[in-house]
Structures are given as C-alpha cells and as structure tokens.
Amino acid sequence: MNNSRRINSALLLVATMLLATFHRAALAEPILQWNFDGQSQPGAWTGKYGAATAGPQTPRYPNFSADNQACQFAGHEGAIVVKDHERGGFTNVRFAAGDTLAFEAWLKIKSIGRGHNVYLIGKGRHGKLGEHLGETNQNYAVRLQGTHEEAQLGFLFTSRHPETKKTDWHRWWSTAEVPLTGWHHVAVDYTFGDGASLKAYIDGKPTDGVWDLGGVTDLPPVQDADDLVIGAGYNRAVSQSFQGWMDSIALYREPLDPAEIAERCQYNPPPPPVTREMIPSGKVLVQISEKGVPESNGWPEEPEVTETYVEEVFGLFELPHKYVATGVRGDRANPSHVRASAVVTFPAGKHRLLLRGRGHQGTCFSLLLAGGGLNHQGAYGVTDELSKKMIEHPVSIPDYHATIHAALGIDPYQELFDGSRPVPITDGGKPVDALFS
C-alpha cells in the first residue's frame, strides 16, 4: 500500500514537472528587450534621449504594475541604436533563411502623417548614418503607415538571390489598423525563406494583409553588419520616425504563440464618463477636459475632466473664461475636449440629428445656420478629404456674417459710424444667395 502511494506520488510529480516545463518552453524568450523600467537597456541613444513617462498601467492594463514606465520617442530627434555583433554588439541580431524573426511592442501614437512610413524597428538601410553599407540592405523592419484615421502595421525586408545576388524589396501592410489614441499592442513574426509564414497581431487579434513591391518570396534576406535602430527610419526624417510612446519592446528568434499574445493584451475599459445620475433633471451637463487629450487626429481615450458646469440648452457658442490661481484669466489647453450631456425624451417619429467633428482646421471649418428664412437644407460647400482645403463654394467669415444679417432682415451693406469714420458692419461680406433660394 505504501509503495503504491509512493509510485502515484512520483507519477504526479513527474507529470507536474513535465507540464511546467512544457509551459515554460511555450513562452518565447527575447534576444533583445526594452522595458524602460530604470534598468540597463540594450543599445545607446543617439540624438535626444527618450523621456520616461507613464506607460500602460493597472487597472486598465492588468498585466502591468500601477507604476509601470514607458519611453517617449521624439521622432527624428532621437533613437536607440544597437550595434551588430561584429561591430561590438553583445548579441547576434541577424536572421538568415530558415530563421524566424518575431517582434512585439506596446505603443501609443502621438502623431503620424497620412502616407508616412514610420519605423518601430529596423536593421540596415542606414547609408552614411550606419556602417556605410548602402541603402538597399534592409535586413528587416517593422513599421507603421499613416492612413486616413489610423495606422497600418507593416513588415519590410530586402531579399538577395543566392546565385545572381540580385536584390528586391518585399513589403507587407496589414488589413486591420492601429488606432491613434490609447495604448495598443502590435506583434509580427516571419520565417525567412517561407513567404507564407508571416503572422501579425493588433491588440492580440490576428490580422491578414497584403504583400506588394516584390511580393511574396521564399528568397533569403540580406544580412550584414549594419545597425539595428529603434524609433527612427533610414535617414532619420520626420516622415520615417516614430512620434509617441513605446514600452515592452522585444525581439525573438522563435514564433509567437497566438494564445499568449491574446493573454498579454488584456484591457479593462474605464467606467462611462457620464451616467444618468450625474445629469441634473432638465439641464445640460457640460464637461471640459484639458488633460489627456491627444494631439493626434483622433478622439481622446480617457480625457480627464478638469471643469464641469450646467447649461439650460445645448446651444454652446463659447466656453466660460478660465481663471488661474492668481485670479487672472488663463488660456485653455489646445487641444481641449468638451462633452455636453442631457437626458432627452424624443417623441415617436422621424428625427434628424446633426453630428459635428472634433475640432476644426485653421483654414476651413464648419458652421451651423438654422431658421431665419433659410431654405437650403444640408451642407453647403465641400472640402478635401482631410477638411483642410475648400474645393467648392467657399464662404468667408464676412460672407457668413452678411448671411446672418440678411436672414434677420438687416442690410448687410449698411455702414455704422465711429465719429466721422464709416465702419461696414460685415467688412465687405456678401450674403450667400444659394441659402435663400
């Protein structure tokens, strides 16, 4: 009986050890890693050092500590450079045919231009800024490409034919995109020599994509002694350099486990910014946020409400003045975020809602006119796709004011007098006739 118990215990111990060993083996071990936690990191900064800042933290991101730190990259002004092992680097970061390269990082984008190809990591293609090995030696790179509202995840490398030595470019862009606000996780793994092997993930979810330039290939990559650079492109230009924050950057020599990637991307959404209990009956609750509003072209993730007040209606034509501690007026943050909320009961039937975009461009923006005998319905005037340039029916501010005066029955060409000096009330504006016809 005792011998049987010993055997069962031994079998249980062996099974437990095997299970634990298997679990550890399933987790890839990075060959390079940057956590920005105050400890020594691989490589050296060139140009402007990255600034320590708050990274993804619990409770929003439960896999991180409450004081987790990240690094802010200042675009073309600074980057991390890791030397090849033949040039003094402490580990081999080259990949040949049959080798698997895997990369992952948490990132938060500050800004990215449409069509800009921004490097998260890249080895080779540095020309005179690297080891003078030319600019057609892209060993590998993981990048972002700015789109209309978000950013595609990309992979790039140069192949070299083993016999002809001819080189070619191979570029891949994801179908799914990375949002421009908040922290997001990206990951890519690819086995060189196997063109169908590329896998990519955004926030733990797999995404497909499209190869272009030289397309899918089984050819081996260029591999040489050029530098590995984090956060900047081959010539350190603004359009190639990352503006934002990164954390938990890692480079591997083995494929990533999809289940493990999904596990790393846990996120607890914040409580709703407005609840019914917060809104006074029959009133409009207005919240102003001057902290946590991104400069990028997107909505804030979790703006911090810095001021709250109550209005009678939704007609907001200006915000209250801001006063600093000394009692004098101060400037509001730019950009700021305004949220107006009310509990409204709509009667049964068809209703028309007007949606306005966040902010406005300095060269053109939207204004609303209603009532006053206007017959036109819908938008008047057309901008380009970025709302930066008027294409059809531009309306100047004087014309807009003249239209308001005409709608109210006031002659927009009337002149007022400051002493003996005539002052046109609309600064030469003309009513927009199309709004009255």
Image: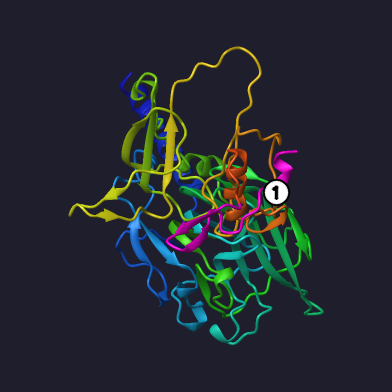
Name the image quarter holding the N terminus: top left
Q: How is the image coloured?
A: rainbow
Task: Check residue 248 for magenta coloring.
Answer: no
| Three-letter amino acid code of the residue under disc 1 | Gly
Q: Position of residue 111 (x, y in %)?
A: 51, 59
Residue at the (63%, 62%) spot, across then down: 99
Which is more toward the observer, 402 or 95? 402
Residue at the (64%, 58%) spot, across then down: 154
Question: Circle 1 is placed at which residue position?
Answer: 381
Point out the residue furthest to the left here. Answer: 326
Please say whether residue 217 is visible from this viewpoint: no
Q: Which residues are magenta?
A: 413-437
Which is more toward the observer, 428 or 254? 428
> Mark 1: few, some, or many residues within 10 Å (few <14, many ≥20)?
few
Regarding mark 1 in the picture, which secondary structure is present there?
loop
355 relative to 392, above or below? above
Please say whether residue 241 is visible from this viewpoint: yes
352 relative to 330, above or below? above
Q: Position of residue 29 (x, y in %)?
A: 47, 55
Task: Check residue 425 for magenta coloring.
Answer: yes
Name the image quarter holding the C terminus: top right
Q: Position of residue 344 (x, y in %)?
A: 48, 20
Point out the residue furthest to the top here. Answer: 348
Numbered-mark total: 1
Residue at the (38%, 34%) spot, across then down: 286
Which is more toward the observer, 191 or 436? 436
Point out the residue furthest to the right here. Answer: 164
Q: Position of residue 332 (x, y in %)?
A: 35, 53
